[in-house]
Image: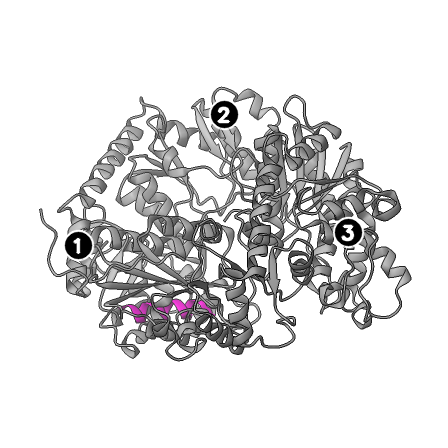
Amino acid sequence: MLIRIIMGQPHALLVASPGIGHLIPILELGNRISSVLNVHVTILAVTAGSFSPTETRAIEAAVDRGTCEITELPSVDVDHLVEPDATVITKIVEMMRATKPAIRDAVKSMNRKPTVMIVDFFGTGLMNVAEDVGVRAKYVYVPSHAWFLAVMVYLPVLDKVVEGEYIDIKEPMQIPGCRPVGPEELMETMLDRSDRKYRDCVQRGEDIPMSDGVLVNTWEELQENTLAALREVGELRRSGGTLSIEQTKELANGLELSGQKFLWVLRRPISYLGASSSDGDIISAGLPEGFLNRTRGVGLVVTQWAPQVEILGHRSIGGFLSHCGWSSVLESLTKGVPIVAWPLYAEQWMNATLLTEEMGVAIRTSELPSKRVIGREEVASLVRKIVAEEDEEGQKIRDKAEEARVSSERAWAQGGSSHSSLFEWAKGCGLIMDQPHALLVASPGLGHLIPILELGNRLSSVLNVQVTILAVTAGSSSPIETTAIQAAVAKDHLVEPDAKVVTKIVVKMRAMKPALRDAVKSMNRKPTVMIVDFFGTGLMSVAEDVGVRDKYVYIPSQAWFLALMVYLPVLDKVVEGEYVDIKEPMKIPGCRPVGPDELMDPMLDRSNRQYRECVQCGEEISMSDGVLVNTWEELQGNTLAALRKAEELGRVIRVPVYPIGPIVRTRSGGTLSLEQTMELACGLELSGQKFLWVLRRPNSYLGSSSSDDDLVSTCLPEGFLDRTRGVGLVVTQWAPQVEILSHGSIGGFLSHCGWSSALESLTKGVPIVAWPLYAEQWMNATLLTEEIGVAIRTSELPAKRVIGREEVASLVRKIVAEEDEEGQKIRDKAEQVRVSSERAWAQGGSSHSSLFEWAKGCSLVSCAPLD
């Protein structure tokens, strides 16, 4: 992550609970605090595993704004602390409790102690950490409205005085000074008092008064009475590969001993994986004592993410110590940077040999780093050899690296080898015509998705080809259309409990055949060609099933790897015993032999199923119409020639090979039932009003294999799209909600009443058709309709029955039609709320002043804002 530190600033620490719905409000709060108060903000994000793509995009967007330092805390396994059927809320609360040691360590490792700590609703159990580490003030942030806060802080009282289930009480429950809460406004956590999640919520309500105050996402003019009631009770303020520790130390000593300048992007050592210490601990625990002081001015150690391509492109870079993953290698070669090869696993060992002994652009250690610790003297020697100008061997390597850079540029210049090869391939499979359509299929995992995305971008930009990518996760940028298809989960009987990742991926890809077949059949334009990656070779038969003429395999690695894979079925027949026990390197016709040190993990144990799967994938490559490989002619001419020659590997692979490299990689809501979706569609049509409908997958479709485009044909009334053409627009992908609500033509917003979504509408002056489904949405709907007066709602809760088309049409007309008197009052109120929301954040406005009042109270600022 990018760290922004401004000396002299106060420091606010924010802690986000797991889940994108909890992370984004904390990110937005952090940005507001930083930008308005000029405060340094650190956000500790607790995750339930690795960040999802959506979380990653949210974090990247926050980082791009440059206002917050964001750190991911290691995931904590709480399965042994909760019942097997525990709800998500219970798991989140328990996970936050279990994260205490990690947060304590993270704060202790910070160079500047925070002035204040802010937690969200699920993090109230963490507040005693503030006292442990000497943080003076602790606050709770509630990204919802004041009525929700009132219910939460009063829940411990209700728990003592109310008998039986709240849902069985006929009269609304009184909350002092606030609107009563009826059965229909109860959150799910309050529906069953015997459930642990209810007890957890009661505990949160008890924890809040132990804080130094509460920040709540509302403003004075919007909820004046509720805020006043809360003040009478108490004060409220509004608002790649890793090394062992031993090897890390030797590498550090070697860098120091070399006397060369360096930039070291330092990952957490192996023994730290899964530990609770933060990345900052690496500096003190994984490096020799005094190392940072002694190398100050000579070296720079970075413990966060760094822009590798940009760094390698800097003219001061003289060499690159790489674990030899192929994408990383290409990043170095295309910049003309020589390599110190440090392979750890998989085909990295092959790549290291290729780089050193065939291409001559690298130097390597005397033994594999995975076999023994490489000493400091050898490290220093390698660094000096690759960097020092007076070293003759190093100069040859640098010259070779520069030649590789020049040849890589030539390869993609107009008429260059890869450029021409790509067009030759495209012409051969009929892609070069009137906007043809290429279908790409990516295996599960980011390491498989990114190469496919980059290939898709290259096809689209260079060939002017429409590209559709089918993957287990969605994400790309225009002009590629990316469709997400859910990989069929491998059944227990398909893989062993201890199956390797390779086995699971291959089996999962084969199990995706029906989903892939359905997705292609539902496309408006049939693909001209289908491209799969190495693990997707078992899907090629789908091309014939759906009438796609050509099928290709894309290998985002180099040609030697391809050669080994296509020759593996031959080796499997002629070699006896384990490959790892063979002393002499195994010969591949026309190519460099493969020794034990170059074997990939699947080849180390021939009795393991993952080996058999790789053999089968190798056999299936020859059933394609050709192979695209991420290399170029001048780089691996001999190996490519061997793959083409019939007397060498051509007789094995039997299909054309197209080198097209280097392609370098770059660096909350609700759903409706199918029946309700139908009625909503009919109601929109019946209303006669213009509409934009961002259509989500209906409940019954969740977990199914159909694509989002299937919604148009299967969950909408027959002929609906034709009849409403020119009147309505149905969007089945993500849409920019805030920008849409800001448009002058928007007259109303049908919302499930999540508070963040409601605020987006209110701040734009857009009246709401309230359609709550769960949680506090029911409360929010009542608040919006009966107290604030900016919304209209259904006669009954949509969760209880299907709302008919006539009622839908009536609601839409009432909120939009200018001649409706009740609707006009709601529209006027919505505009008043918009104006008041702007005033609240204007200089001297209620929320602006309140934020400074809070900040001054906890020493984040020393004075109030100037008028």
In the picture of the structure, the residue carrying the numbered disc 1 is: 850
**How would you rate the neighbour count of disc 3 (Cα within 10 Å): few for under 14, some for 14-19, many for 20 or more?**
many
* Main SS of residues in magenta: helix
Q: Amino acid at mark 3?
A: Ala
> Gap between marks 3 and 1, in whole Å?
67 Å
Which mark, by number, is residue 563?
A: 3
User: Which range is magenta?
Assistant: 196-208
Which mark, by number, is residue 685?
A: 2
- Nearer to us: label 3 or label 1: 3
> Residue 547 is drawn in which quadrant?
top right
- Nearer to us: label 2 or label 3: 3
Q: Secondary structure at mark 3?
A: helix
Residue at 61%, 69% (x, y): give it: 365
Q: Are marks 1 and 2 in contact (CB under 8 Å)?
A: no
Instruction: Check the image and report above or below for 580 versus 545.
Output: below
Which mark, by number, is residue 8?
A: none
Where is residue 54 shown, x and y percent of the image? 48, 50
Q: Amino acid at mark 1?
A: Ser
